[in-house]
Image (cartoon, helix red, strand yellow):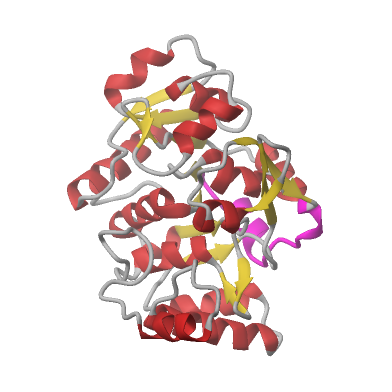
Amino acid sequence: MDSPLLSNIVMMCGGVGGARAALALYENLPHHSLTFLVNTGDDFTHLGLEIWPDWDTVVYHLAELQDPNRGWGRADEGTRAMEEFERFGAADWFHLGDRDLALHVYRSWAVRQGWNRQRLAERLTEKLGLRCRVLPLTESGMDTRLLLQDGVEMEFQDWFVKEQGVPEVQAVLNHRPEENKLTGGVIESLSAADFLVMAPSNPYLSLGPMLSHPELACVIQELGIPKLAVSPLIGGKAVKGPLDRLIGSLSAHSGQSAIAQYWSSWVDGLLLPSDEISDLEGVDLKLFGGPTMLKSKPDRQAFCAALQRAWESF
């Protein structure tokens, strides 16, 4: 994009879909104008290590280090550490690649030295060669749990990774989000933004935990700037993951209607595949068409052009 009009854009994101959208912006917009606020609702401690799954996925995409097949983790990753964990009988349901493990060890050391998350995130992004802000939303991991159909509460990672998202869900629970302090730079970035974009992430599992934070929610509602959500559905279906089943369990609507209903009280507009706009006639959102499958550079460039057209129309 030759002369981007956007000078400050904030994207809230999580998961692989959010990471690909973040990469689209990073490839096509001035790096210094970008801030990515990343979900901390699935952060947890594993084998004594600080694990930030969504943040890691975003920065690995931006640094072009991600595994292109899985969408998460590092490319050409080794498995020797995992083989040793298995030898010792340690929990092996959460995969830690050899080079990925170095990040977790360093981060855990820094946390124990008293580093806050803003300082740590800035150090890591600098060392990975990134020139934008990638901030974990809160100074500690938010407590996201799934209330299953049988009434049992399950920790997010246990449900999503260990159980592969199979148990049926009746609600997503965000426990005491107000107890999590927002990371330094979050409010500052939102206050300086010209445009707020909700990435095509899972609204229930990635963006919902972020929006459950009362201070953040208040700031977003009061922002006097255009706010746009990007649908994670293509052809009315999720590309991967448990979103389709969650919509069936958690929404009275289906397909793109469920996404529009979810975002209607948060944003001004919704970007979705052009041929699906007619499915949402009558919704109280401005609708914009554009590519949302962001695996190729041309698609990511066209996606950014669609974002800019949307911003100009508000």
Residue drawn at 36 percent across, 85 percent down: 80
Q: Is residue 183 magenta?
A: yes
Relative to 103, does residue 314 appear above or below in the rendering?
A: above
Residue 192 picture location, percent across and down: 58, 54
Which residue corresponds to the image point at 41% horizontal and 28% vertical from the top-left? 313
Tell me: 4 left or right of 32.
left
Q: Which residues are magenta?
A: 177-195
Is residue 172 depicted above or below 126 in this figure? Answer: above
Viewer-nearest residue: 213 or 95? 95
Residue 133 placed where, x, y %? 50, 66
Query: Horizontal placement of 89 versus 7: left or right?
Result: right
Residue 7 seen in the current view? no
Q: Count up the numbered dots.
A: 0
Residue in the foreground of this view, choosing between 39 and 80: 80
Taking the image as shown, residue 87 lies to the left or right of residue 145, namely left
Up the image or down, 231 lies above or below 16; here it is: above
Q: Quadrant of residue 287?
A: top left
Q: Nearer the viewer, residue 49 or 209?
A: 49
Residue 96 lies, with reference to residue 313, above or below; the image says below
Q: Is residue 124 magenta?
A: no
Q: Residue at x 28, y 50 (%)?
A: 3
- Residue beneath the point at 50% across and 57% down: 161
Q: Residue 130 location in percent, x, y?
A: 39, 73
Q: Is residue 144 shown to the viewer in this render? A: yes
Q: Is 3 on the left-hand or right-hand side of 183?
A: left
- From the top left corner, tell me how far across and down residue 218 is, in percent: 74, 42
